[in-house]
Image (cartoon, rainbow, N blue to C red):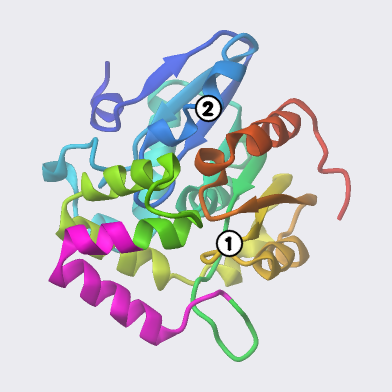
Amino acid sequence: MGIVEEAHNVRIVGKGNETVILAHGFGTDQSVWKHLVPHLVDDYRVILYDNMGAGTTNPDYFDFQRYYTIDGFVYDLLAILQELQVHSCIFVGHSLSAMVGLLASISHPHLFTKLILVSASPRFLNDPEYFGGFQQEDLRQLYEGIQSNYKAWCCGFAPLVIGGDMESVAVQEFSRTLFNMRPDITLSLAQTIFEFDLRPILGRVTVPCHIIQSTKDLAAPVVVAEYLQQNLGGKTIVEVMPTEGHLPQLSSPDVVVPVLLNHIYHDLADQK
Protein backbone atom coordinates (compact mmCIF):
# COMPACT_ATOMS: atom_id res chain seq x y z
CA MET A 1 0.00 0.00 0.00
CA GLY A 2 1.32 3.43 -0.96
CA ILE A 3 1.72 6.43 1.32
CA VAL A 4 -1.36 8.20 -0.05
CA GLU A 5 -3.49 5.05 0.20
CA GLU A 6 -2.47 4.48 3.80
CA ALA A 7 -2.99 8.09 4.88
CA HIS A 8 -6.52 8.15 3.43
CA ASN A 9 -7.51 4.60 4.47
CA VAL A 10 -8.16 3.74 0.83
CA ARG A 11 -10.32 0.65 0.41
CA ILE A 12 -10.92 -1.12 -2.90
CA VAL A 13 -13.78 -3.61 -3.24
CA GLY A 14 -15.74 -5.20 -6.04
CA LYS A 15 -14.94 -6.18 -9.58
CA GLY A 16 -15.69 -4.66 -12.93
CA ASN A 17 -14.19 -2.77 -15.83
CA GLU A 18 -15.47 0.58 -14.59
CA THR A 19 -14.33 2.31 -11.40
CA VAL A 20 -16.63 4.16 -9.02
CA ILE A 21 -15.09 6.58 -6.51
CA LEU A 22 -17.12 7.29 -3.37
CA ALA A 23 -16.06 10.46 -1.53
CA HIS A 24 -17.62 11.70 1.71
CA GLY A 25 -18.32 15.17 3.08
CA PHE A 26 -17.65 17.20 6.23
CA GLY A 27 -18.00 15.41 9.55
CA THR A 28 -18.26 11.90 8.15
CA ASP A 29 -15.96 9.21 6.77
CA GLN A 30 -16.23 6.50 4.14
CA SER A 31 -18.71 4.56 6.32
CA VAL A 32 -21.39 7.01 5.15
CA TRP A 33 -21.58 4.89 1.95
CA LYS A 34 -22.19 1.59 3.75
CA HIS A 35 -25.72 1.17 2.39
CA LEU A 36 -24.64 1.77 -1.22
CA VAL A 37 -21.44 -0.29 -1.51
CA PRO A 38 -23.02 -3.79 -1.42
CA HIS A 39 -25.11 -2.90 -4.48
CA LEU A 40 -22.05 -1.94 -6.55
CA VAL A 41 -19.46 -4.62 -5.89
CA ASP A 42 -20.74 -7.14 -8.47
CA ASP A 43 -20.42 -4.70 -11.37
CA TYR A 44 -17.85 -2.08 -10.43
CA ARG A 45 -14.44 -1.65 -8.90
CA VAL A 46 -15.31 0.62 -5.96
CA ILE A 47 -12.75 2.90 -4.32
CA LEU A 48 -13.50 4.53 -0.97
CA TYR A 49 -11.26 6.87 0.97
CA ASP A 50 -11.33 9.20 3.97
CA ASN A 51 -10.74 12.91 3.60
CA MET A 52 -7.88 14.20 5.70
CA GLY A 53 -9.27 15.49 8.98
CA ALA A 54 -11.87 12.74 9.32
CA GLY A 55 -11.75 11.03 12.69
CA THR A 56 -10.48 7.86 11.02
CA THR A 57 -7.34 9.60 9.72
CA ASN A 58 -4.17 10.46 11.64
CA PRO A 59 -4.62 14.05 12.89
CA ASP A 60 -0.86 14.53 12.71
CA TYR A 61 -1.16 14.38 8.92
CA PHE A 62 -3.60 17.29 8.85
CA ASP A 63 -1.81 20.33 7.42
CA PHE A 64 -3.80 23.43 8.41
CA GLN A 65 -2.19 25.49 5.66
CA ARG A 66 -2.84 22.86 2.96
CA TYR A 67 -6.51 22.56 3.86
CA TYR A 68 -7.07 26.28 4.38
CA THR A 69 -8.68 26.10 0.95
CA ILE A 70 -10.57 23.29 -0.76
CA ASP A 71 -7.64 22.87 -3.17
CA GLY A 72 -5.88 20.63 -0.63
CA PHE A 73 -8.67 18.06 -0.99
CA VAL A 74 -8.51 18.32 -4.79
CA TYR A 75 -4.78 17.53 -4.71
CA ASP A 76 -5.50 14.55 -2.45
CA LEU A 77 -8.12 13.14 -4.82
CA LEU A 78 -5.83 13.49 -7.83
CA ALA A 79 -2.97 11.88 -5.88
CA ILE A 80 -5.18 8.91 -4.98
CA LEU A 81 -6.24 8.46 -8.62
CA GLN A 82 -2.62 8.66 -9.73
CA GLU A 83 -1.33 6.22 -7.13
CA LEU A 84 -4.07 3.70 -7.98
CA GLN A 85 -3.56 4.28 -11.72
CA VAL A 86 -7.20 5.21 -12.27
CA HIS A 87 -7.53 6.61 -15.79
CA SER A 88 -11.32 6.95 -15.86
CA CYS A 89 -14.02 6.84 -13.17
CA ILE A 90 -17.56 7.64 -12.15
CA PHE A 91 -17.16 10.02 -9.24
CA VAL A 92 -19.80 10.16 -6.50
CA GLY A 93 -19.15 13.05 -4.12
CA HIS A 94 -21.15 14.18 -1.13
CA SER A 95 -21.26 17.84 -0.03
CA LEU A 96 -17.62 19.01 0.27
CA SER A 97 -16.43 16.19 -1.98
CA ALA A 98 -18.97 17.07 -4.65
CA MET A 99 -17.18 20.39 -5.05
CA VAL A 100 -13.79 18.65 -4.87
CA GLY A 101 -14.86 16.49 -7.80
CA LEU A 102 -15.98 19.53 -9.79
CA LEU A 103 -12.63 21.26 -9.29
CA ALA A 104 -10.63 18.13 -10.11
CA SER A 105 -12.64 17.67 -13.30
CA ILE A 106 -11.71 21.15 -14.55
CA SER A 107 -7.99 20.38 -14.61
CA HIS A 108 -8.35 16.65 -15.41
CA PRO A 109 -11.63 16.13 -17.31
CA HIS A 110 -10.34 12.92 -18.92
CA LEU A 111 -10.35 11.18 -15.52
CA PHE A 112 -14.11 11.49 -15.02
CA THR A 113 -16.88 10.05 -17.18
CA LYS A 114 -19.48 11.76 -14.99
CA LEU A 115 -19.86 13.41 -11.61
CA ILE A 116 -22.71 12.47 -9.28
CA LEU A 117 -23.13 15.32 -6.82
CA VAL A 118 -25.05 14.58 -3.61
CA SER A 119 -26.16 17.56 -1.47
CA ALA A 120 -23.73 19.84 -3.29
CA SER A 121 -23.32 23.57 -2.76
CA PRO A 122 -20.85 26.03 -4.31
CA ARG A 123 -21.58 28.60 -1.61
CA PHE A 124 -23.22 28.19 1.80
CA LEU A 125 -23.43 31.89 2.68
CA ASN A 126 -26.30 34.05 1.47
CA ASP A 127 -25.70 37.25 -0.42
CA PRO A 128 -28.17 39.71 -1.98
CA GLU A 129 -28.39 37.76 -5.26
CA TYR A 130 -27.97 34.24 -3.92
CA PHE A 131 -29.53 32.01 -1.23
CA GLY A 132 -27.08 29.49 0.19
CA GLY A 133 -28.87 28.83 3.46
CA PHE A 134 -26.61 30.55 6.01
CA GLN A 135 -26.07 34.06 7.31
CA GLN A 136 -22.69 35.19 8.63
CA GLU A 137 -24.18 35.27 12.15
CA ASP A 138 -25.13 31.58 11.80
CA LEU A 139 -21.50 30.75 11.08
CA ARG A 140 -20.24 32.86 13.98
CA GLN A 141 -22.46 30.88 16.34
CA LEU A 142 -21.37 27.60 14.75
CA TYR A 143 -17.68 28.42 15.24
CA GLU A 144 -18.29 29.53 18.84
CA GLY A 145 -20.13 26.28 19.56
CA ILE A 146 -17.23 24.18 18.29
CA GLN A 147 -14.79 26.10 20.47
CA SER A 148 -16.83 26.32 23.66
CA ASN A 149 -18.23 22.81 24.16
CA TYR A 150 -17.40 20.42 21.34
CA LYS A 151 -19.44 17.44 22.51
CA ALA A 152 -22.54 19.56 23.07
CA TRP A 153 -22.05 21.16 19.65
CA CYS A 154 -21.85 17.74 17.95
CA CYS A 155 -25.05 16.63 19.68
CA GLY A 156 -26.86 19.79 18.56
CA PHE A 157 -25.44 20.05 15.04
CA ALA A 158 -26.09 16.43 14.03
CA PRO A 159 -29.91 16.46 14.22
CA LEU A 160 -30.03 19.85 12.46
CA VAL A 161 -28.02 18.50 9.53
CA ILE A 162 -29.64 15.06 9.38
CA GLY A 163 -33.15 16.38 9.91
CA GLY A 164 -34.20 14.00 12.66
CA ASP A 165 -34.19 13.59 16.42
CA MET A 166 -31.32 12.43 18.60
CA GLU A 167 -32.78 8.93 18.81
CA SER A 168 -32.45 8.17 15.09
CA VAL A 169 -29.65 5.84 14.03
CA ALA A 170 -28.46 8.29 11.37
CA VAL A 171 -28.18 11.17 13.86
CA GLN A 172 -26.27 8.97 16.30
CA GLU A 173 -23.95 7.83 13.51
CA PHE A 174 -23.24 11.39 12.34
CA SER A 175 -22.73 12.50 15.95
CA ARG A 176 -20.18 9.69 16.34
CA THR A 177 -18.14 10.56 13.24
CA LEU A 178 -18.25 14.27 14.11
CA PHE A 179 -17.09 13.65 17.66
CA ASN A 180 -14.25 11.44 16.39
CA MET A 181 -12.71 14.50 14.76
CA ARG A 182 -10.28 16.67 16.66
CA PRO A 183 -12.06 19.94 17.56
CA ASP A 184 -9.40 22.27 16.17
CA ILE A 185 -9.50 20.38 12.87
CA THR A 186 -13.30 20.54 12.82
CA LEU A 187 -13.16 24.31 13.33
CA SER A 188 -10.58 24.79 10.59
CA LEU A 189 -12.55 22.66 8.11
CA ALA A 190 -15.83 24.36 8.99
CA GLN A 191 -14.27 27.74 8.23
CA THR A 192 -12.83 26.47 4.94
CA ILE A 193 -16.08 24.87 3.78
CA PHE A 194 -18.74 27.28 4.99
CA GLU A 195 -16.92 30.33 3.64
CA PHE A 196 -15.72 29.15 0.24
CA ASP A 197 -17.28 30.56 -2.91
CA LEU A 198 -16.94 28.29 -5.93
CA ARG A 199 -19.63 29.94 -8.02
CA PRO A 200 -17.09 31.54 -10.41
CA ILE A 201 -15.66 28.17 -11.52
CA LEU A 202 -18.91 26.37 -12.34
CA GLY A 203 -18.93 27.39 -15.98
CA ARG A 204 -15.54 25.73 -16.50
CA VAL A 205 -16.90 22.27 -15.63
CA THR A 206 -17.48 20.25 -18.82
CA VAL A 207 -17.94 16.73 -17.43
CA PRO A 208 -21.63 15.63 -17.23
CA CYS A 209 -23.08 16.25 -13.76
CA HIS A 210 -25.94 14.42 -12.02
CA ILE A 211 -27.20 16.58 -9.13
CA ILE A 212 -28.96 14.62 -6.37
CA GLN A 213 -30.79 16.65 -3.77
CA SER A 214 -33.13 16.28 -0.77
CA THR A 215 -36.45 18.13 -0.84
CA LYS A 216 -35.55 19.67 2.51
CA ASP A 217 -31.90 20.32 3.34
CA LEU A 218 -30.79 23.00 5.79
CA ALA A 219 -27.27 23.11 4.35
CA ALA A 220 -28.12 22.88 0.64
CA PRO A 221 -31.60 24.14 -0.27
CA VAL A 222 -33.24 23.01 -3.52
CA VAL A 223 -32.60 26.45 -5.06
CA VAL A 224 -28.87 25.66 -4.82
CA ALA A 225 -29.32 22.55 -6.96
CA GLU A 226 -31.19 24.70 -9.48
CA TYR A 227 -28.36 27.25 -9.38
CA LEU A 228 -25.82 24.50 -10.12
CA GLN A 229 -27.84 23.25 -13.07
CA GLN A 230 -28.14 26.73 -14.53
CA ASN A 231 -24.44 27.56 -14.15
CA LEU A 232 -22.45 24.37 -14.73
CA GLY A 233 -20.74 24.37 -18.11
CA GLY A 234 -21.56 20.83 -19.22
CA LYS A 235 -24.61 18.59 -19.42
CA THR A 236 -26.60 18.35 -16.20
CA ILE A 237 -29.61 16.67 -14.71
CA VAL A 238 -31.22 17.29 -11.31
CA GLU A 239 -33.18 14.79 -9.25
CA VAL A 240 -34.88 16.07 -6.12
CA MET A 241 -35.70 13.18 -3.80
CA PRO A 242 -38.55 13.05 -1.25
CA THR A 243 -36.02 13.00 1.58
CA GLU A 244 -35.00 15.33 4.39
CA GLY A 245 -31.54 16.29 5.52
CA HIS A 246 -28.02 16.76 4.21
CA LEU A 247 -26.95 13.11 4.47
CA PRO A 248 -29.84 11.27 2.82
CA GLN A 249 -27.63 8.30 1.89
CA LEU A 250 -27.33 7.69 5.64
CA SER A 251 -30.78 8.73 6.87
CA SER A 252 -32.98 7.48 3.99
CA PRO A 253 -31.06 4.68 2.23
CA ASP A 254 -34.22 2.94 1.00
CA VAL A 255 -34.99 6.01 -1.10
CA VAL A 256 -31.50 7.18 -1.94
CA VAL A 257 -29.68 3.96 -2.88
CA PRO A 258 -31.98 3.18 -5.85
CA VAL A 259 -31.64 6.78 -7.05
CA LEU A 260 -27.86 6.67 -6.84
CA LEU A 261 -27.72 3.29 -8.58
CA ASN A 262 -29.86 4.64 -11.40
CA HIS A 263 -27.50 7.56 -11.93
CA ILE A 264 -24.38 5.39 -11.64
CA TYR A 265 -25.62 2.73 -14.08
CA HIS A 266 -27.29 5.07 -16.59
CA ASP A 267 -26.10 8.17 -18.36
CA LEU A 268 -29.01 10.52 -17.78
CA ALA A 269 -27.09 13.74 -18.41
CA ASP A 270 -28.50 14.29 -21.87
CA GLN A 271 -29.80 17.81 -21.47
CA LYS A 272 -28.47 21.30 -20.98
- Image height check: is 217 above or below 26? below
Quadrant (top left, top right, bottom left, bottom right) of the N terminus: top left
Query: Where in the figure is residue 122, as x and y percent of width and height?
Result: 55, 65
Judging from the image, what secondary structure is the residue with disc 2 in?
Answer: loop
Q: Give the range drawn in magenta.
A: 132-156
- Say which quarter of the image contains residue 5: top left
Which SS does the magenta portion mostly show? helix
Residue farthest toward the bottom in the current orientation of the protein? 128
**Drawn side of residue 105 relative to residue 144, left or right:** right
Mark 1 → mark 2, Cα distance in angstroms: 20 Å
Query: Where in the figure is residue 77, as x and y percent of width and height?
Result: 42, 39
Q: Residue 217 carries which label?
A: 1
Residue farthest toward the left in the current orientation of the protein? 60
The three-letter amino acid code for the residue at tag 1 is Asp
Q: Residue 35 carries which label?
A: 2
- Image height check: is 3 above or below 143? above
**Drawn side of residue 195 relative to residue 189, left or right:** right
Seen at 68% across and 65% down, the residue is 222
Seen at 66% across and 53% down, the residue is 213
User: How many C-alpha atoms fall within 10 Å of the one at disc 2: few (<14), some, or many (≥20)?
Assistant: some
- Image height check: is 267 above or below 13? below
